[in-house]
Amino acid sequence: MTKKELALEIIERLKKEYPDAGCTLDYDQAWKLLVSVRLAAQCTDARVNVVVEKLYEKYPDVEALASASVEEIEAIVKPCGLGHSKAKDISACMKILKEQYGGKVPSTFEELLKLPGVGRKSANLIMGDVFGKPAIVTDTHCIRLTNRMGLVEDLKEPKKVEMALWKIIPPQEGSDFCHRLVYHGREVCTARTKPHCDKCCLQDVCGKKGV
């Protein structure tokens, strides 16, 4: 089985296992996803979802958040860790959205990468979830699982994993596939314990069972 064939098989099986998988960050507007993605660095999505509720109560739109001081934002987002740097990026990012984009989130990958605190992972998430464009989000689950499954080999750097996956994952499948890897990584192919290979829907095709 080639890597491309393996990828297609894994995609189909994960679709059946997690038919409704989607982004685990709560948002109802694009700019909120931008904020949450920045806060999610080295923090759980569950905690981010709780913290942003307080943030949006006080600052309900881009203009309000752009007008807030870094210190005011930091006081609320501190539970997510790295409070000052995250608050600084969020503040700068909202100011740019307000001043350059009329409060909207830019819709190209290149423009997203120019925003403070936005890297390839965040830009891909927004391209896929907000704009419905081809995207591959190489978070920790994606990197760990694709290495274990044998879709990539000994690649840990997010960009290298992303580039390798673009070659074997159909563009229209990338975003949902990465969301399903998050669910599978939390429930079955876990990081902190030995993976639960006995209850894995991929056990007969996985390239590195138990690794």
Image (cartoon, rainbow, N blue to C red):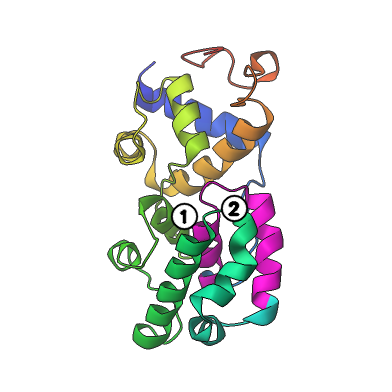
Number of other residues with Cα within 10 Å of mark 1, as a class: few under 14, some 14 to 19, many 20 or more? many
Q: Is residue 135 above or below residue 188?
A: below
Residue 123 image-quadrant placement? bottom left
Magenta includes 135?
A: no
> Of helix, strand and loop, which one carries label 2?
loop
81 vs 150, left or right, is right
The residue lying at 61 percent from left, 61 percent from top is 78
Q: Dot 2: within a 10 Å radius of its alpha carbon, few (fewer than 14), some, or many (20 or more) residues?
A: some
Numbered badge on residue 194: none
Magenta-tinted stretch: 31-56
Give above or below for 203 relative to 61: above
Question: Residue 35 magenta-drawn?
Answer: yes
Which is more N-terminal, label 1 or label 2?
2
Which residue is painted at 65% across and 61% down in the image? Answer: 26
Task: Please say whether residue 105 is visible from this viewpoint.
Answer: no
Whether residue 115 is visible, yes or no, is: yes
Q: Amino acid at mark 1?
A: Leu
Q: Position of residue 134 (x, y in %)?
A: 39, 53
158 or 192, nearer to the observer: 192
Residue beneath the point at 31% across and 41% down: 159
Q: Are marks 2 and 1 in contact (CB under 8 Å)?
A: yes
In this rendering, would 208 be left or right of 169? right
Residue 125 has which mark?
1
Give residue 91's position: percent from left, percent from top.
46, 75
Frontmost residue, 179 versus 5: 179
- Left or right of residue 23, residue 49 in this image: right
The x, y position of residue 90, in whole percent, is: 47, 70
How far apart are labels 2 and 1 at the CA level? 9 Å
User: Which element type, helix, strand or loop, lies under badge 1?
Assistant: helix
The residue carrying mark 2 is: 23
Our reading of the magenta stretch's main secondary structure is helix
Kind of residue indicated by mark 2: Cys
